[in-house]
Amino acid sequence: MDDNSKTIHVEVAYALPDKQRIVALELPEGTTVRAAALQSGLDKQFVELDLSAVDLGVFGKGVSKPEEQVLKNGDRVEIYRPLIVDPKEVRKQRAAKVKARKAAE
């Protein structure tokens, strides 16, 4: 059996508006999404991160069970920040501004 069948190469990414990090990891086959996030060490660089509880995704798609989903070679795990503002509320506010502007014209 060759070495490539025993390990996978993945990236774990986290971004703030002013600071981003991508960590490349070599992990054993069978590693889960959550385990990769925990292995990344990004919680040492971003103290607000609780890698045992944050929402995670792979290539922009949220993972509902990161403790169970196994990664494939080349996957990119993404660590999501909690939403500060409800996106629906932002859209409502934006629409209200546009409506007010049109009414003023």
Image: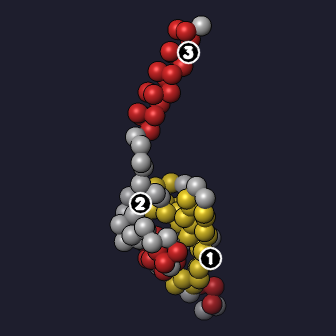
Residue visible at 56% across and 87% down in the picture: 6
Q: Residue at x 45, y 62 (%)?
A: 56
Instruction: Tell me which numbered mark, 3 or 2, is placed earlier along the sequence.
Output: 2
Regarding residue 67, the answer to whether it shows in the image is no
The C terminus lies in quadrant: top right
Lower position in the chain sequence, tag 1 or tag 2: 1
Local SS, label 3: helix
Q: Could you give the CA–CA distance between mark 3 and mark 2, rounded to whole angstroms?
A: 38 Å
The residue depicted at 44 percent of the width and 38 percent of the height is 87
Q: Where residue 65 sits in the image (x, y, percent)?
A: 37, 63
Specify the amino acid type for callout 3.
Arg
Please name whichever residue, 78 or 5, is drawn nearer the observer in this view of the structure. Answer: 78
Residue 74 visible within the image: yes
On residue 24, which mark appears? 1
> Which of disc 1 and disc 3 is earlier in sequence?
1
Task: Say which amino acid is labelled 2.
Answer: Asp
Q: CA distance from mark 3 to mark 1?
A: 48 Å
Identified at 63% across, 90% down, the residue is 3
Is label 3 in contact with label 1 (beta carbons under 8 Å)?
Answer: no
Looking at the rendered structure, the secondary structure element under dot 2 is loop
Report which residue position mark 3 lands on. 101
Select label 3 or label 1 by which is in front: 3
Say which amino acid is labelled 1: Ala
| Label number found at residue 55 | 2
